[in-house]
Image (spheres, coloured by chain):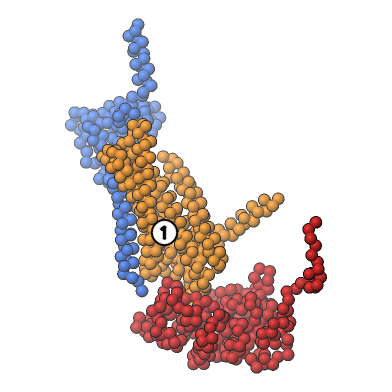
Amino acid sequence: MISIRNLTFSRGNRKIFDNISLEIEPHKITAIMGPSGTGKTTLLKLIAGQLKPDSGTILINQQNVHQLSRTDLYKLRKKMGMLFQSGALLTDMSVYDNIAFPIREHTQLPESMVRTLVLMKLNAVGLRGARHLMPSELSGGMARRVAMARALALDPEMIMYDEPFTGQDPISLGVLVKLIQTLNQTLHLTSIVVSHDVQETASIADYIYLISEGKIAGQGTPEELYNTDSDWVDQFMQGKADGPVPFHYPANDFTTDLLAYKPAL
Amino acid sequence: MKLFQTIGQSSLKFLAKLGRSSLFLISILTGLAYTFSRPNLLIKQLYSIGVLTFWLIAISGLFVGMVLGLQGVYTLSTFGAESSLGIMVAASLVRELGPVVSALLFAGRAGSALTAEIGLMKTTEQLSAMEMMAIDPLKYIIAPRFFAGFISLPLLAALFSAVGVLGGYLAGVEILSVDSGSYWSQMQSAIDFHDDIINGIIKSIIFAWLVSWIALFEGYDALPTSAGISRATTRTVVNSAFAILLFDFLLTALMYGES
Amino acid sequence: MQCKSIEILVGLFVSLCITALFFLALQVSNFSDLQDNGSYTVIAHFENTGGLKSKAVVSMAGVPIGRVADISFDPDNYDALVKLRIDARYNKMPSDTSASILTSGLLGDKYIGLTPGGLNEFLQEGDTIELTQSALVLERMISQFLFNSSDKDK
């Protein structure tokens, strides 16, 4: 469904992605994981066409995202849902209005139908009773669920989750994991989850890509990655403190450093 | 040597910023039809920009007018010309103080609020989220605010001048016993509708354009961090002040140069 | 989605400001003067306009009946050509009306005062006022005064 071929993207002098290629299978949950700062969110923005790559192509359903006109790009985005890390709810509208927003803007449906749709989406994420609250009154987990409902408002084919599990308490975590899996199955969505929470992500992902230093360091199903030969992948998946990514920041020999004190003359 | 380097760098950065902001402005202007097809958005912004600045402008106008009245009587009485107080107060307000001071106050209150609001929306990724929902934030969020500012400021400037003239009346006629008849009659014969009032309105329209543009662009361009937002609001107020005073000089020279 | 009270407040705000604008136009400026009920222009030549400005008042019997439209130099007669725009309501000006440049108060602005003549013909658009009195130039008056007083001494 989504083919990324030979993608290169740099910010300033830093190469965020160096000639990477990956495939996102339809109707499956694909996870993109890696250490912090490798540009996972940037990848989502590239897929959505918000950023332009230096070279390479991103094809969604055989359409080259970056060659689409503005109108066609907007049409494509209506079939995509995106869940931002902070929820990104519009702060001056209630929960109900936030979810109704894309429906009201993109369709001419009468208010009664809009109401039905909004309540259905809210029910799917379990927050139908919270519809009159304002975003500032929601907890982080609830905000993310509302954002999920909003991402699903226009019945997209594909949904992208940007770090959905970061900073959540165990119960919210459980809720979110269950939601992502259930929604993917029942709505026949294609889901991309960007995260560095190995346990949660591995429990629901069908396929995982590990990105580090602009390249794909490993890929496979969760079982394949847990039984990997690569030391780096192993360190990442098991969360080991030391390994190919060293514990110590590069420095001189410890004894020499300690004894090297020279008092000012 | 370093000095020249810095000057060169700053000029290039300034030019780049000017270019970005011009493209920004063009995108806003293409949103004119969209804004007027959604009057709810415009009305909401007129409320938060215009109505909430109303009391600031009205009270400031009153006090400025009263000060002009007091100072005017004090100075004019040395020439025995207190009866010209009306002309002095009205001319100062309608030609200069009305448009300029109301624009400066507007930049400080509404301009900085706009910058902070847009900057915050950028930081919390609300603008990105809207783009992802295939709604252009420039048309939905920015354009209504621009046109609301564009409509509000000239109205507020008129209010400032009017309240100021009344304030001058209060101070001069009621408190310092200048003749009320000559206050109004001298004023009416000297203040020309076309040269003074219309010019004042033209000035405040141009200021409205400038302040709204600067405020919205600084917010849109801000770094998405809390430090970035606070720097952006400061820049709004400072750059607006520069722009207002510069254009005031240019417009005054243009308008009053020949007569 | 919209609170009714917000709409009312915005309406109130806009109407208050427009009222302020009308106040400025009518009470503060000379807007009412500009109500063009129609006017006609007559010409007058003066030896010395003495600081008469465009848009100065044209009055008869102390009542404003028009404005000075234009002041220019007449290269044929080497004097000043002043165009007076008189309100159309006052269209029964005798054609031998005279115009003088007067000062309002001692040191005030210059204006044109018209004194009616006696003929039964009336001034039309484009007519010329023949009898004119130029402005009193202060320096000339003073030198005349000095001249006269020194004469008397002799």
Residue at position x 38%, y 51% from top?
A: B60
Foreground residue, A215 or C37?
A215
Q: Is residue B60 above or below residue B120?
A: above
Foreground residue, A44 or A70?
A44
Horizontal side, residue B165 vs residue B203: left or right: left
Residue A188 at x, y percent in the picture: 51, 91
Secondary structure under tag 1 reads: helix
Q: Is residue B250 above or below residue C99?
A: below
Q: Is residue A79 above or below residue A188?
A: above
Residue B18 at x, y percent in the picture: 55, 58
Which chain is depicted orange?
A: B
| Identity, as a three-letter code, of the amino acid under mark 1 | Phe
Residue at position x 48%, y 77% from top?
A: B133
Chain A rendered in what hue? Answer: red
Residue A156 at x, y percent in the picture: 49, 85
Chain C rendered in what hue? Answer: blue
Horizontal side, residue B8 vs residue B247: left or right: right
Foreground residue, C110 or B241?
B241
Q: Is residue A120 above or below residue B126?
A: below
Tell me the residue that label 1 is attached to: B150
Q: Quadrant of the C terminus of chain B?
A: top left
The quarter of the picture where residue B73 lies is top left
Residue at position x 36%, y 13% from top?
A: C147
